[in-house]
Amino acid sequence: MDLSAKMALIIGMFSLTTMINLLFGYLRNRTRKFSVNWFLCIHLPIPLIFVARTFSHLGYTYIPLFVMAALTGQILGGKMEF
């Protein structure tokens, strides 16, 4: 895989991770703190992102980047107002 294709894949995975966590961050902010639903809103995106990263054949070295994307999505999703 050439560098431009790998960078496009990394940017796409970063965006996907952020968008998934935007939704769950929004839902987390609307639930009672430390409830089961609150816990699920934090932890349910993890297997989805794991599967996406596995199918994209990205190595373990990119996990910190995706953790940062997940945290960004959770924080920004919690601040969204509709």
Image (cartoon, rainbow, N blue to C red):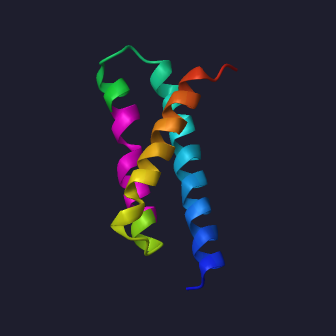
Residue 65 lies, with reference to residue 41, above or below; the image says below
Q: Is residue 52 above or below residue 67?
A: below
Q: Provide residue 45's location: percent of width, then percent of height.
A: 42, 45
Is 36 above or below relative to 58?
above
Q: Residue at x 58, y 30 (%)?
A: 76
Q: Which residues are magenta?
A: 40-52
Image position, residue 74 (x, y; %):
49, 33
Which one is in front, 64 or 13? 64
Q: Residue at x 51, y 40 (%)?
A: 21
Which is more toward the observer, 20 or 63? 63
**x and y percent of residue 68 in the render?**
46, 44
Answer with the quarter of the image where residue 55 lies: bottom left
How many marks can you see?
Answer: 0
The correct choice, above or below, for 76 with respect to 9 in the image is above
Left or right, 39 with respect to 10, comes to: left
Among the 4 quarters of the image, the one containing residue 13: bottom right
- How far across and how far down the image is residue 5, in percent? 63, 77
**Is residue 14 found inside the magenta-colored segment of the image?**
no
Determine which quarter of the picture holds residue 78: top right
Residue positioned 30% across, 19% down in the render: 35
Q: Quadrant of the N terminus?
A: bottom right
Q: In percent of the image, x 54 and y 37: which residue is there?
A: 73
